[in-house]
Image (tube, rainbow, N blue to C red):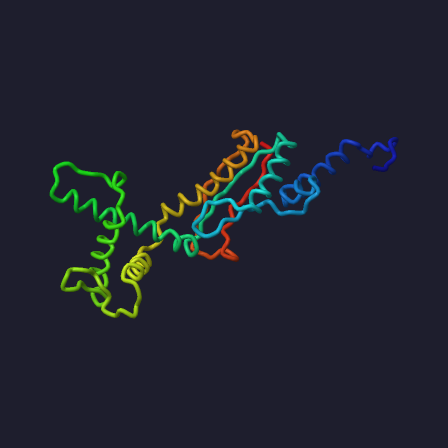
Amino acid sequence: MTGDLDNPKFSIAALVFDALTNVITKVVASPFTAIASLLGSDADISKVTFIAGSTHLGKQQKENLDALANALSKRPALKLEIKGAAFSNQDWPPLQSEALTVQLTQLKVDELNKNSKKKVLLEYIKLTEKEYQEQLAKLFIKKFPSLAERSIFGNPKLKDPEMGDFYTVAKDKLSKLIPPNPQRLHKLAKARAGEIAKYLITKEIEIKRIFLLDVSTASKEAPENLIATTLSLTAK
């Protein structure tokens, strides 16, 4: 810092303010790069990526969050905002199998309730493997009568045996009929943000310093089949 202290236009306060403004601007523009540099790292920890359909934090993601937790512990005035995300084009296919199980379970529930005075609820029913296959066969033959039928003994079979195993083909084709469920994708995005928050809490970051923002769900594809949950900092 240089200047003439006798010059009435010279102001230490103004210089300090300008310096702080520059630092704050840079931190806001690239907050995690700035924090990582304080730790002697150039890692970008502004995003936490997940594989399609998953909420699992990988080794690299945990290492990045460890660095973030370390930085946050040294900057108690900073607060963290987490914005979960899900992409229907990539996240939905891995979730279709789960959605099909729910659909088949509902069919079983409807059967049980059809001639019963005491109604059962979906959440209390879990299909056995045999029950799953029974419902799968019924639905597949109903939806794809040109592909499947029952033998003279009542067993389900494919009209063209070269298509492969009946249950494998049935599960694949029925799963693909189920359109993306916005509520399920929203739940996945929230769960991802929650996993990040829980991990940081185990690293002794106070829960009151962590904020979960409204999530983002989109139909566009994420690069490299990795879905990024975005992190940002505030000093509220």
The quarter of the picture where residue 18 lies is top right
Q: Residue at x 73, y 35 (%)?
A: 17
At which x and y percent is residue 148? 22, 65
The quarter of the picture where residue 168 lies is bottom left
At which x and y percent is residue 134? 22, 53
140 or 76, nearer to the observer: 140
Q: Residue at x 14, y 64 (%)?
A: 152
Q: Quadrant of the N terminus?
A: top right
57 or 160, nearer to the observer: 160
200 or 8, nearer to the observer: 200
In the rendered view, would you say 77 is above or below 112?
above
At which x and y percent is residue 211? 51, 35
Q: Residue at x 37, y 51 (%)?
A: 95
In the rendered view, would you say 210 is above or below 153?
above
Residue at the far front: name it. 153
At which x and y percent is residue 212? 48, 37
In the rendered view, would you say 1 is above or below 175?
above
> Position of 38 compared to 115: left or right?
right
> Position of 180 compared to 202: left or right?
left
Label total for image: 0
83 or 66, nearer to the observer: 66
Q: Quadrant of the C terminus?
A: top right
> Position of 5 compared to 117: left or right?
right
